[in-house]
Amino acid sequence: MTSNRARTALVLATVLVGLSGCAGGGGTPAPATTAATSAPTASTAPGTGSGAASAAAVTITISNFAYEIPGSVAPGAEVKVVNMDTAEHTVTADQDATLFDVEVKENGGTATFKAPSQPGTYAFHCTYHSNMHGSLTVK
């Protein structure tokens, strides 16, 4: 139990440090967001991207059954999703699940995907929890 708490604290600290570098000023984070055009990869251990994409990697955090979304992502950017909740979640595109549909295990689980290559706003939801919605802005 203690190692799970320590792992969760370490993942949360890593996410917070990563998000602080992306902060664009005050305000409330936008609703949850995640998008992908390629097949996602998922694991329960934190991972690192190995792609040579020129777009910077961004992180979406799921906490308290809500998505914490970056302001925007570059087309084709690697998007990492970290789930800090005790329940499994998904990030599934509303209109076309082939754009992105990642499943993220609970307690620090992660998944990654590529943002769509076309600029736009992509609404998404959690297939397990109907109250969870967000949008990913690609520009």
Image (cartoon, rainbow, N blue to C red):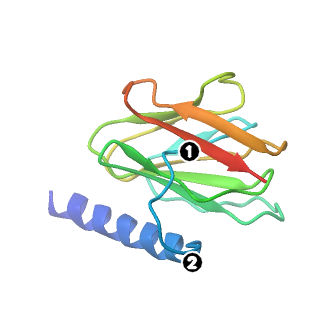
Q: Is 131 left, or right, of 36 in this rendering?
A: left
Q: Position of residue 116 (x, y in %)?
A: 77, 42
At 47% from the left and 76% from the top, the residue drawn is 17
Q: Which amino acid, by three-letter code, is at mark 1? A: Thr
Q: Is residue 25 above or below residue 110?
A: below
Q: Where is residue 101 in the image (x, y as percent from the top left)?
A: 60, 31
Q: Marks 2 and 1: in contact by CB < 8 Å?
A: no
At 77% from the left and 57% from the top, the residue drawn is 74
- Classify residue 118 by image quadrant: top right
Query: What residue did someone put label 2 on?
Result: 21
Secondary structure of the residue carrying numbered label 1: loop
At 59% from the left and 73% from the top, the residue drawn is 24
Q: Point out the image quarter for the C terminus.
A: bottom right
Rate crowding at label 1 as few (under 14), some (14 to 19) or many (20 or more) other CA atoms within 10 Å.
many
Q: Point out the image quarter for the N terminus.
A: bottom left
Count of marks placed on residues? 2
Secondary structure of the residue carrying numbered label 2: loop
Q: In this view, does 67 lie above or below 102?
A: below
Q: In this view, does 10 lie above or below 83?
A: below
The residue lying toward the viewer, choosing from 43 and 38, is 38
Q: Which amino acid, by three-letter code, is at mark 2? A: Gly
Q: Where is residue 9 in the image (x, y as percent from the top left)?
A: 29, 67
Q: Residue 33 carries which label?
A: 1
Marks 1 and 2 sit apart, C-alpha to C-alpha, by 18 Å
The residue lying toward the viewer, choosing from 94 and 18, is 94
The residue lying toward the viewer, choosing from 19 and 1, is 19
Q: Is 98 left, or right, of 55 in this rendering?
A: left
Q: Residue furthest left?
A: 1
Q: Residue furthest front?
A: 27
